[in-house]
Image (tube, helix red, strand yellow):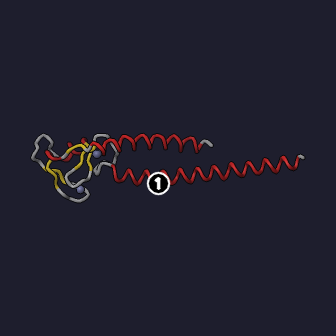
Amino acid sequence: MREKRKQAENLSRNLIATERQRIRKGLENTIGMVVTIQGHLACLSCEQVKMDLNMLQCGHNVCTDCMNEHSNTAHHRSLIRCEICSQESNVGHVGKSIPHSKICDSFIDVKKELAMLALSDSAL
Ligand SMILES: [Zn+2]
Ligand SMILES: [Zn+2]
């Protein structure tokens, strides 16, 4: 009787360990995907995902802080050069991309959620 109980305990311990491993692997994969998405969304200069990203004429993104730092935004005809593709954009034609800022907003939420999951996972 005692032997059976021990077997059952071992079995459930193994199941829990396998399940934890599966969750951890899933979490690692998801973090990898998030890092990839972050690379596509981020400001080309400071590499941060921010709500105030502006789309250059080439389609790459730059945040307002970096745009102000690298160009004279007071003059609408001044140019800003993309650090990725070297194309120049007229500051007056650089604008916020609404879908993009919504994606960034959701992305920031996903990252927060994932950080919480990763924290609770390491506490297991
Ligand atoms: Zn930036
Ligand atoms: Zn570009």
Between residue 65 and residue 95, name the one nearer to us: 95
Rendering coords of residue 41 (x, y %): 33, 50
Q: Who's the residue at 45% across and 53% down the image?
A: 33
Q: Is residue 21 above or below residue 106?
A: below
Rendering coords of residue 47 (x, y %): 33, 49
Give the quadrant of ligand 1: top left
Q: Which image quarter is the C terminus in?
A: top right
Q: Is residue 84 above or below residue 106?
A: below
The answer to whether residue 46 is left or right of residue 31 is: left
Looking at the rendered structure, the kind of residue marked 1 is Gly
Q: Quadrant of residue 72?
A: top left
The answer to whether residue 15 is left or right of residue 99 is: right
Rendering coords of residue 16 (x, y %): 68, 48
Q: Residues within 10 Å of mark 1 (few under 14, many from 20)?
A: few
The answer to whether residue 47 is left or right of residue 19 is: left
Residue at the far right in the pictured view: 1
The answer to whether residue 118 is left or right of residue 67 is: right
Q: Who's the residue at 18% across and 54% down the image?
A: 81
Q: Who's the residue at 44% across and 43% down the image?
A: 110
Q: Is residue 98 above or below residue 26?
A: above
Residue at the far front in the pictured view: 99
List the residue tagged with mark 1. Answer: 32
Q: Ligand 1 within 8 A of label 1's CB?
A: no
Rendering coords of residue 92 (x, y %): 13, 45
